[in-house]
Image (cartoon, grey):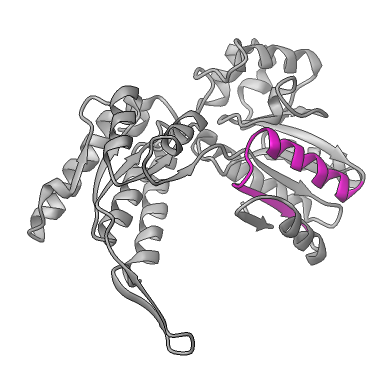
Amino acid sequence: RAVEDSGLGRVHDKILKNRRKTLGTLRDVLKGKSVGVIRDDPDTGITEIAKPIGVVAAVVPSTNPAATPANKTMMALKSRNAVILAPSPKGASTCQLLIRYIHAELDKVGAPRDLVQGLLQPSKELTYELMRQCDLVVVTGSQKNVRAAYSSGTPAIGVGIGNAAVIIDRSADLADAAEKIKRSKTFDYATSCSSENSLHIDAAVYDDALKELEGQGGYLLDGSQKARLQKVMWPNGTLSPNVIGQPPAVIAKLAGLDDGAAHEAAFFMVEEDGVGPEHPFSGEKLSIVLAVYRFDDLDKALQRIEQIYEYQGAGHSCGIHTRNPEHAERVAHRLRVARVLVNQA
């Protein structure tokens, strides 16, 4: 339903995402103490008491119209709050189907259905009004929606642009890195905000790393192909919805990539050396397109990634493929992200 509803991603991956992320969240929160005395420290005499906040407005992106509301609903109910889901218009029917499933489960335990509600005909105006009227806003999605939540006058928690940057240093297992990057980048056609958006490869292994990525189905565009793809992806300076969460063949056709190998590719790579609005491939793409940078010195790579995050993506995620623990620690200490993945997809 989510793919049919939104036109984004692919069915098999949506199913995996719903199962893994939702069950993972359930595992994490199920046995935790969420209301009442959650911590008591006799040494300091400090007791922490958690209590419900009231009605939570949960803003849901079109890229994840089932998994995101399911997870937000679990966390709201676990903390004894009610929740009102505000889906993207593209994902509205998926969200309504989820609510029907949730209501059936609430009926089984004798809980009021009104604990979980949703906007039947979502719109920007209704969502913004919900933000103002509720007790807490939890928003996942565009930077515009996150900023609207923070300026609504209601306490808010926002998760916006991902734009994850990933480093491959000269000590990395290149075959393992390429396989994991391919698996992550192509999952649900890169609709996840934690999907790799840029690769930063040590010059000493740059060519070999590209060969490994090509062996995993990556297609490296030349200069003219990159220019055509850029026009398609950012026709008016903003990312086109026509490329978000789409299969490689669709993107290849839109960009006029006549090479048969492009239509059979798993993902696309473009070489880049700049950052910012004049170099849009340095930003979040929500598509199976990777920007690839070369570096000679790790500190210079980190400096460029800092520039990328100043442009888009600060506070989210990054990664490094390395056999050198000191390199991983340098990344973690320096970059302004909440999560650093080491040798992972």
Question: In this view of the protein, can residue 4 be seen by the observer?
Answer: no
Q: Tell me which segment is drawn in magenta.
A: 297-322
Q: Nearer the viewer, residue 14 or 91?
A: 91
Q: Position of residue 12 (x, y in %)?
A: 41, 40
Q: Quadrant of residue 198?
A: top right
* Residue at 64% across, 34% down: 312
* Viewer can see residue 85: yes
Identify the residue at image location x=31%, y=23%. 125
The correct choice, above or below, for 236 with respect to 306 in the image is above
On the picture, is 188 further left or further right than 76?
right
Does the magenta portion include 150? no
In reply to whether residue 305 is colored magenta, the answer given is yes
Q: Position of residue 259 (x, y in %)?
A: 70, 15
Q: Is residue 278 above or below residue 16?
A: above
Q: Nearer the viewer, residue 257 or 270?
A: 270
Total count of labels: 0
**Point 13% across, 46% down: residue:** 114
Query: Which image quadrant: the N terminus?
Result: top left
Q: In the image shown, does 163 or 251 lie closer to the viewer? A: 163
300 relative to 135 in the view: left or right: right
Q: Relative to residue 182, is residue 261 depicted above or below?
A: above
The x and y percentages for residue 211 are: 80, 38
> Where is residue 13, by image quadrant?
top left
x%, y% of residue 53? 28, 55
Residue drawn where x is 16% and y is 42% of the image: 100
